[in-house]
Image (cartoon, rainbow, N blue to C red):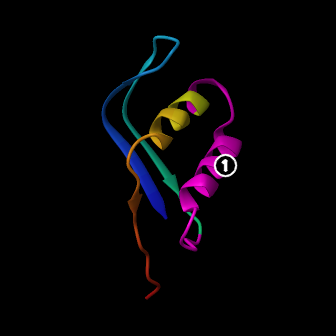
Amino acid sequence: MRMRHEPRVLQLKNGMCVEGATLVVVRPCLGGGDDVEDAELAMVAFGDGVYGETVEALLKSKSYLVEMNSF
């Protein structure tokens, strides 16, 4: 899974502020162009509006790969 986090206040176009926004995309990582697939999946899930705008901003930030192993 990939995680993106904005620890500072994120100013949206409509004047609203979001603090500590986090986006986690959970799916198998196959290597290569995962960022593009993550962006498509996140935009379909959150669509337009405040959430969509927040996702767009988070997709521009650095992503972290979090590995999960079954136990």
Amino acid at dot 1: Glu
In the rendered view, would you say 54 is above or below 26? Answer: above
Q: In this view, which residue lies farthest toward the top?
A: 15
**Residue 48 belongs to the span the image colors magenta:** yes
Q: Which residues are magenta?
A: 28-51
Residue designated by label 1: 40
> Is 6 placed left or right of 3 in the picture?
left
The part of the image, by quadrant, that contains residue 20 is top left
Image spot of residue 25 (x, y percent): 54, 56
Provide the secondary structure element on which disc 1 rests: helix
The answer to which quarter of the image holds residue 64 is bottom left
Q: Which residue is drawn at the image coordinates 38% and 48% (left, top)?
A: 62
Query: Is 9 included in the stretch rendered in magenta?
Result: no
Q: Residues within 10 Å of mark 1 (few under 14, many from 20)?
A: few
Q: Residue furthest front?
A: 32
16 on left or right of 29 = left
At a point 60% along the width and 48% down the height, the residue shown is 39
Q: Position of residue 47 (x, y in %)?
A: 69, 35
The residue at 58%/62% (across/down) is 33
In the image, farthest residue toward the left: 8
User: What secondary structure do most residues of the magenta stretch adopt?
Assistant: helix
Q: Residue 58 appears at what percent x and percent y? A: 46, 39
